[in-house]
Image: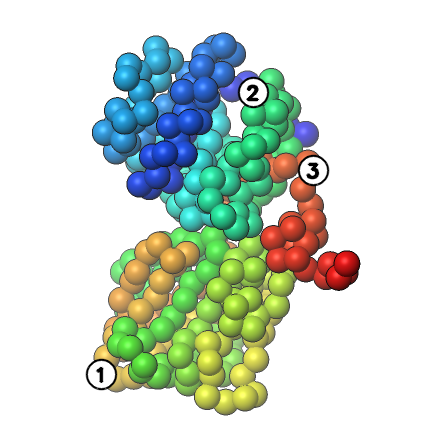
Amino acid sequence: MVKKSIHKVTVVLKPHLISEFAAVLPNLCTWFSRRKVNVQFLSKDQDRLKQVFKTLPKNVSFVDEDKYHNFSDLILSLGGDGTLICVCRQSTKHSPPIFGVNMGRLGFITEFSKAEFFDELDEVINGRMEIVKAQLYKVEIQEQGKVIESSFFLNDAVFNKNHISRMIWLTVENDYEHIYDLSGDGLIISSPIGSTAYSLAAGGPIIHPQVGSLVMTPISPHSLTHRPIVIPDNMAIHVKSQDKDDPINLTLDGQQLLTIYPYQNVKVSKSKARFVQLVHNPARTFFHTLKVKFTHGRREA
């Protein structure tokens, strides 16, 4: 249990959604005001909020997207897993805890439902919260031994062809040796948190989030011997395209698209400095979530 004083909360909204927020946000801002908590929304959402509020409450202000992680005591993510992942990918070394509320459908990593989150949020505002640290993973695009671009992912990094129905050829290595050459539709490198997403759909294993690992899951490999491989997360992975003519795509968390050229190498490794603090729902365990979201292992009535 972590004790932390909460005076300023940044609320990050799922893009485009208006109707759900019209019912929630006025009550939420009033609720915070009664507890003497100031609320920040992202500057880019000002026009959307004009459709929700006739007049902005006195405790509401706006903050730029590149600053809110450093000027908040708590971040409240209202959306789905995609919204929460976006918040996590924008994190800094000084990011506060993140409270994820599921306003969508599946909501696997968003810990709280829109029907119940006020009770748990009250505990958090009063300085009582259970924190789970989630690791971020670094992607470095290297050219002639130099890093020319870098980024991070929480869920997964996906390599595939930038043309429809084209096969990809990849060489995969670690720092010490060659692992395999792969031909097929692509390759997913997934974190434990991301193991229940695209990797699972492609035949990868479910990995408990407390297991320090990465899983490499081929997408429709042309060789039946290519199977998902789980490796320790202190091992770096190097991926290089064997196609000498065309670039390939690298997609991070389904939110950032990078183009990888034949003469470039991609290094994937655990970030030594970047992780996020997620507020944990004490009523929800990993295996409970599997049963609720996936009807996992539930007996037939």
**Label 3 close to label 2 by CB (< 8 Å):** no
At 27% from the left and 31% from the top, the residue drawn is 48
Query: Which residue is label 3 attached to?
Result: 283
Closer to the N terminus: mark 3 or mark 2? Answer: 2
Callout 3: SS: loop
Give the crowd class for mark 2: few <14, some 14-19, many >=20 residues within 10 Å. Answer: many
Give left or right: position of 109 versus 8: right
- Which residue is found at the position 42% from the left and 27% from the top? 23
User: Image height check: is 107 above or below 199?
Assistant: above
Q: Is residue 53 left or right of residue 286?
A: left
Residue that sits furthest to the front in the current view: 301
Name the amino acid type tagged 2.
Ile
Q: Say which amino acid is labelled 3.
A: Ala
Instruction: Indicate the amino acid at tag 1.
Output: Asp
Residue 137: image location, x then y, percent: 47, 55
Judge whether 249 appears above or below 67 on screen. below
Q: Quadrant of the C terminus?
A: bottom right
In the rendered image, residue 27, in percent from the top left (x then y), is placed at: 45, 20
Q: Which residue is mark 2?
A: 125
Few, some or many C-alpha atoms within 10 Å of disc 3 (few <14, some 14-19, many ≥20)?
few
Judge left or right: residue 165 versus residue 222: left
Looking at the rendered image, the disc whose residue lies closer to the viewer, 3 or 2, is 3
Label ID, residue 204: none
- Mark identifier at residue 245: 1
Q: Please identify the quadrant where the N terminus is shown.
A: top right
